[in-house]
Every structure is written in C-alpha cells, then in structure tokens.
C-alpha cells in the first residue's frame, strides 16, 4: 500500500500518537515500533488496525517507512462482548446479593435502580408496581429524580409507554 495521504484518514483521537510513532521510527534507521490506530476506509467506515512501523529508508529497494498492519476490529468486538457479559454478570450478582440479604423490597429496589442507572448510563429510573385489582402501575421506588413529581407516577395497564411495556412484558 502506497498512500502519501494516509494521515488524513487516521482518526483524530489516534493521530497524535500515530504521528509521533512515525517520527520516532523515521529518526532511527532500521527501527521498528508497534502501532494501533483507526483509519477511515473507502466507504467511510472506521477500521481498527494493529501492526508495526519499520524504518527502511536505508534499504535501497524500499527507501521508505513500511507499515505492516492487520484489521484488529474482530478482536476488539470480542473483547467488548466479553466485557458486556462480565458487566451483566456483575449486575446480576449485585442484585442477587441485595435480594437475598434483605427481606425489605425497598432495599433490593435501591440496588436494582442503582445498577440500572449505572449500566444504562441514565440519570434517573423508577419502578412501578402493578396492582391487579385496579389494573394500575404505581410508583414504588426511584433514583436520580430532582423533584418529587416522579413519586406520584402511575399508569393504566396498556396506556402510555409504561402501561404498554407492562402489558406486553417488554422494555
């Protein structure tokens, strides 16, 4: 691959470190360094690349800086998948500990809501309990709300987002 404008396609967050590595290799004959960066492909998608940069300026057949790269996106996706699974297990463990260590449902809900807001990266969440006699969902516990208006939350089963989610048993 001969591309004199490859730096224009390097991700902005990676450009400084990548450029520094190129400069270091260029200053030292026959040196070689590892490199990881993202680059935009022809279709505009980002590729995660990993490999080596080698100074071959004094090699007459090359007379340049050689990059040997491989697509590292599959490994990164697998790592992210493993991390997501680990996070899910940690959440379930924390909820399990809370529910098994206390008979008070409010204590368990506090832990559940803490995990929900942390894992989903939301500012606030609440739990509405279903009353089968009134067919209403009524506020039970919440976290992150700035006013007490959330404590007055209620919904009719099948109406509004919460009511429809409860009716369909989906989030």
Image: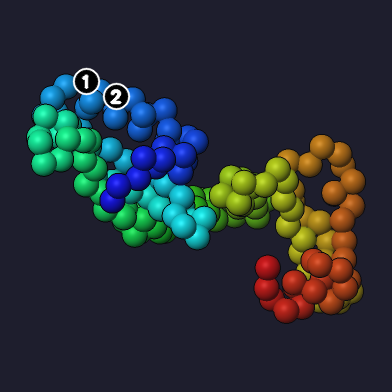
In the rendered image, the vertical position of residue 86 relative to residue 135, given as above or below: above
Q: Position of residue 89 (x, y in %)?
A: 43, 57
- The quadrant the C terminus occupies is bottom right
Q: State the image quarter where residue 162 is shown.
A: bottom right
Evaluate whether residue 132 shows in this view.
yes
Q: How many marks?
A: 2
Q: Please name the residue that numbered disc 2 is placed on.
A: 23
Task: Tell me the number on the disc at residue 143.
Answer: none
Secondary structure at badge 2 equals helix
Secondary structure at badge 1 equals helix
**Label 1 CA crowd tier, 10 Å (few <14, some 14–19, many 20+):** few
Q: Position of residue 24 (x, y in %)?
A: 25, 23
Question: Are the two marked residues, 2 and 1, in contact with CB atoms closer than 8 angstroms?
Answer: yes
Q: Is residue 29 left or right of residue 97?
A: left
In the rendered image, the vertical position of residue 130 relative to residue 106, given as above or below: below
Question: Which residue is nearer to you in this view: 155 or 170?
Answer: 170
Question: Which residue is nearer to you in this view: 130 or 170?
Answer: 170
Name of the residue lying farthest toward the bottom: 168
> How far is disc 2 from disc 1 in space, using C-alphas?
6 Å
Please report the residue visible at 29 percent of the width from the left and 28 percent of the height from the top.
21
- The type of colouring in the image is rainbow
Q: Position of residue 157 (x, y in %)?
A: 84, 74
Question: Which residue is nearer to you in this view: 106 or 46?
Answer: 46
Name of the residue lying farthest toward the front: 60
Please report the residue visible at 89 percent of the width from the left and 52 percent of the height from the top.
152
Q: Is residue 78 left or right of residue 122?
A: left
Q: Please name the residue that numbered disc 1 is placed on.
A: 27
């Amino acid at each position: 691959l001969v591309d004199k404008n490859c730096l224009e396609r390097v991700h902005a967050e990676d450009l400084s470190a990548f450029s520094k590595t190129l400069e270091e290799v260029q200053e030292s004959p026959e040196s070689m360094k590892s490199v990881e960066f993202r680059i935009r492909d022809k279709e505009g998608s980002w590729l995660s690349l990993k490999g080596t940069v080698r100074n071959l300026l004094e090699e007459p057949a090359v007379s340049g800086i050689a990059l040997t790269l491989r697509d590292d996106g599959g490994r990164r996706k697998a790592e992210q998948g493993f991390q997501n699974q680990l996070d899910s297990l940690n959440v379930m463990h924390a909820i399990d500990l809370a529910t098994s260590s206390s008979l008070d449902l409010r204590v368990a809900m506090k832990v559940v809501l803490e995990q929900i807001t942390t894992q989903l990266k939301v500012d606030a969440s609440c739990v509405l309990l279903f009353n089968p006699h009134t067919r209403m969902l009524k506020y039970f516990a919440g976290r992150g709300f700035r006013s007490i208006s959330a404590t007055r939350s209620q919904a009719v089963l099948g109406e509004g987002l919460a009511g429809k989610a409860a009716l369909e048993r989906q989030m």
